[in-house]
Amino acid sequence: KGPGRSDTSSPQVLILLQFLQETLAAVADNAWICHFVTEMCRQLSSYNGLPLEKNFLYKCIGTTLGACTSKDLVQKQLQELLETARYHEEAEREGLASCFGICAINHLEETLAKLEDFVRSDVFKKSVGLFSLFKDRSDNEVEKIKSSLILCYGYVAVYAPKELVLARIEADILKNIFQYFNTKVLGIKVETKDLTLKLCLIRSICMISQAICNGVKCGDFIFSRKAELVAQMVEFIKAEPLEAMRTPVRQRAMIACTYLVYPSSAPVPQTLCLPGDELVGWEPWLPQACTVSRRAEGCLGWAEQSPPASALLPDVSPPSLPQHLGPWIKSSKEHERQRAVEVSAALLDFYLSKLNVSTVIPFYNLGVLIALFSPRCSDSLASVRQHAVDCVYCLLYIQLCYEGFARDHRDEMVEGLKALKKGLEEPDFTVLFHTCNNIAMVIGKRVPPDQLMSLLLAMFEGLADPDKNCSRAATVMINSLLKERGAVLQEKVPDIMSIIHSKLEEVDEEHIRKAAQQTVYILAAQHKSVVVSSLLGSPLPFDSHTCAMWRSLATEPTLTSQILEQLLEKVNRDVPYKESKSFPLLGSGSERVATPLPLAATCALYEIMSAAESGPAVLGLYPPLFVTLLLRLSCTVGVQLPRNLQSRERRSSTSLGPAPRSLQPCSCAVETLKVMLIRGGSEEVARAVGSAGGWELMASPERHHDGIAVLAGAMARHAGPRLPLIVKNLIPTLNSVFDSQRVTTTAFFAELLNSNVVNDLILLETMMDNMTGRQKDSCMLVRMLALRGLGNIASGSPEKVRKHGAKLLASMVNGMDDKDDPQNLVALEAMSSLSKLLDHLEERDIQSMLLHIAIRIRPFFDSEQPDLRQSSIVLFGNLTKFSQGHCEVFVEQILNGLVTLLLHLQDPKPEVVKACKFALRMCGPNMGCEGLCDMFLNHLQEERSLHYGEFMNNVCKHLMQCYPEMLNRLILTNLFYFKSNWVDIRAAAPMFIGESLPAPLASRALNLLLKDPVPTVRMKVAETLGRLVRIL
């Protein structure tokens, strides 16, 4: 059933009411009738929950009250009905209104008076006051009471005798209806939001209009408030949403207008009053309403028979079509589209036939109108397709008329539209879209420049067309228009890009996404810089739609290469970060904050290169891409996001759906470099770096250079042919103002020198010279890595070491003498690298520096850093290979370090112990003591364990025999280690004293160590003293 209709209006109910009316007339006993109606009113509450029965009872009460001659009883019962009604129930409101209407047949005055009295009564005011205690219910409940009273007036108007009610319509009925409907706050009219109140007002006005039309004296009746009522209905219609055409308010308001606008003396056309519509029809004897389309047809037919068509010309001109017919032209219902487009074609043809332009004027709505009709050329209905072409045809000729051409002028291109109609007869999609493309080409050549943008904007709205064929046709036409005329739209490109993005958000159709990506590509082919700048201006992190727009730029290699070059320029244009002072409470330091443009450009590079189609372009730009992204990565380590982006990053990470890609500058740079390698055909490089944990190392501020070394090694193994151009592009960055870029480049070169590939590619000399030049760099890490690279030549190109031996040796010595090296990291690297080079150096090169190196590294034997101890001792052992020409001088250096090497055989670090064994084995042959040499060679093998006490006992014996003159110096050196920081060394020192000094002297020296706080040391001293006692 439609709203407001029930079984209580069925023919059976009418028969029962008629039976009741005749029964009451036959009884003709007023007292009995009064008692009867009183009893019926008492029974009302018994039917709560039975809406149909209660509605019927209300009508019976109204019929009985109409038969009652006691006016006092009638008013009393009406008052009771108003006080006890359950206004929140729709059936109750309907029943109460029907009761008042039927009662008004015989008691019009009493009914109207009681309705007015009730509103002024304390009962109504108390009800409103009671509802106001509940703020969430007050407005709703009061609106329901007002709705019921308004509905009562409508029923009174339609039931009451017409000769009596006409005089009361404007003076009483309409006055009170609008008094209830209009709410005022502080004297200001407030628009009601209650749907029930609106619908009841519309129904009452419709019933009042019917009462006027059916009045016997309607010919003499002047309906002065008709215009006001029509305006109110039009206001209701305008306020309704356009996307839902058949809303209850719109339908009922249109029907009310139908009865209001027709002359009260003329019958309503039959086409406007078709039976069977269920939207309205509150009582059987009220005229039924018709569907919107049928009513529109009736209005058009009536208009043709009424004023001349020329009088309607201003109202049906093309600019008004979108407002009046647009919703129906885009309707999801086929019959509505068919009628709307057919009517539009007829109107445009009529307008064109009557058009007479005396001066050249612009046709402002041309673009909007063409965008309205042209997508319908692929409508699912063939008739709509045909009429849509007719509409475009007429619009283009109207434009020509506005441009000054005669009405009978024929344009060859516009006339070609008629020939295209044949291609629209078949429903084949391919044919339809090809035809739409041809239509768009005609439109593109004939639409004036000032209308092009409005045409495109309106065409974009067609992407949401409920007919998928038409939305596809809109995309085809947009792209065709842009190909034809896009070159003149440079200033509008940002607006178009913004619209494309918004439409991708609104429409979730695969064909729309693909077409939108094609649109971006077409724009980029014409306006690369503007498109790139527009997309870079999108908020970070890029949403999925912006990412799709970036990936659309990867479809054609030439364009993709140009876009990539522009993005590389954006990455390098701005500084990669800015120094920002930390919050005062967190310290006085500063942090590095990423700058937006390079960050956005890096994200854009990732999106483009993540598309498989970008492969050829990436291959063509492999060296500059690799170098730029490598240097970008170097400048993002430890760099923070701007605060505004940090909050967005947190929100995106906590949002539902797939996890977004990290926006952190370093992670973003790592991922972009990784995808560049994959897309550039270096999957093996990316895989090798990942297997070695290189990507994670690159993101670590402490281990970044180690990660770069992993990358360089993988490039040398798997992408050697790419290296010459990469090295060439990287060399200038060795002079970069950013320490991080110099560190990264030096680390990359240093590891490349570890491979023979640089020699094969004739890069060795160039890279070696650049590494040598970095020894004066202000950054300590750069100097260290440069020495590492020079040392790596020993493993990468050992045959070249002899050629460049003097230069390499000088670099190592300079590194060991580095004055700005508080942690001795440069010296450590110099010693490690020199150890690797020694096997390949000429003896003449090393001998001149031998003594200097030996003296320089001696202090590192006792360094707190195990690496320094180990490297210096190993280097010392390696130097002995070159001591033959300076035997006596170098033997003295050996003896100066002998005690240290012997004691460090007890070093807490195994690698230092291993180094000492190696150095002593190497020193033995040069000491001129065969016994010591044999001991060192036999007892200090790496795999053999050492009985230290026994070993030291034998060593001391050989020293006393071979070097008695050196004994005092050795003992003094040993005494220094009584205060060593290492417990094991202090515990070893007494053994040397006990075996080297005469017993009395040794006893006095050892007594000093008996006070050592470490039990182990005191125990070793006691053991030594015990041996001395046995000797004594």
Image (cartoon, rainbow, N blue to C red):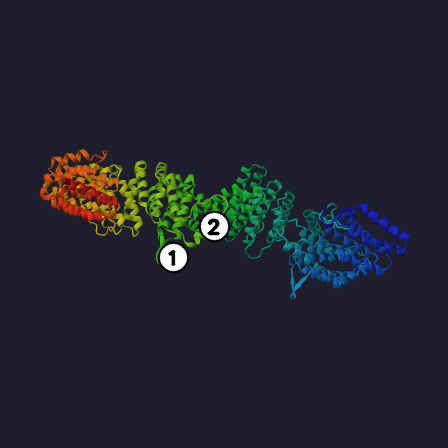
Q: Amino acid at mark 2?
A: Arg
Answer with left or right where residue 957 lies relative to residue 634: left
**Whole-percent x, y for residue 458 in the image:** 54, 50
Secondary structure at numbered mark 1 = helix
* x then y, percent, for residue 438: 52, 42
Crowd tier of the residue under label 1, counting other residues whose Cα lies within 10 Å: few below 14, some 14–19, many 20 or above: few
Given contact means CB atoms under 8 Å apart, are the residues at marks 1 and 2 in contact?
no
The mark nearer the N terminus, 1 or 2, is: 1
Query: In the rendered image of this protein, does residue 490 appear above or below residue 963?
Result: below
Mark 1, residue position: 586
**Tag on residue 757?**
none
Q: Is residue 272 above or below residue 112?
A: above
Which quadrant holds the C terminus? top left
Which amino acid, mark 1?
Answer: Leu
Badge 2: residue crowd in 10 Å (few <14, some 14–19, many ≥20) = few
Percent of width and height locating residue 142: 69, 58
Q: Nearer the viewer, mark 1 or mark 2?
A: 1
Camera-side residue of 557 and 19:
19
State the residue in front, 400 or 704.
704
The residue tagged with tag 2: helix, strand or loop? helix
**Would you say 875 lies left or right of 570 here?**
left
Image point 77% across, 58% down: which residue? Answer: 82
Asked if residue 125 shows in the view, the reply is: yes
Q: Which residue position is annotated with label 2?
A: 651
Residue at position x 60%, y 40% from top? 380
Q: Quadrant of residue 685?
A: top left
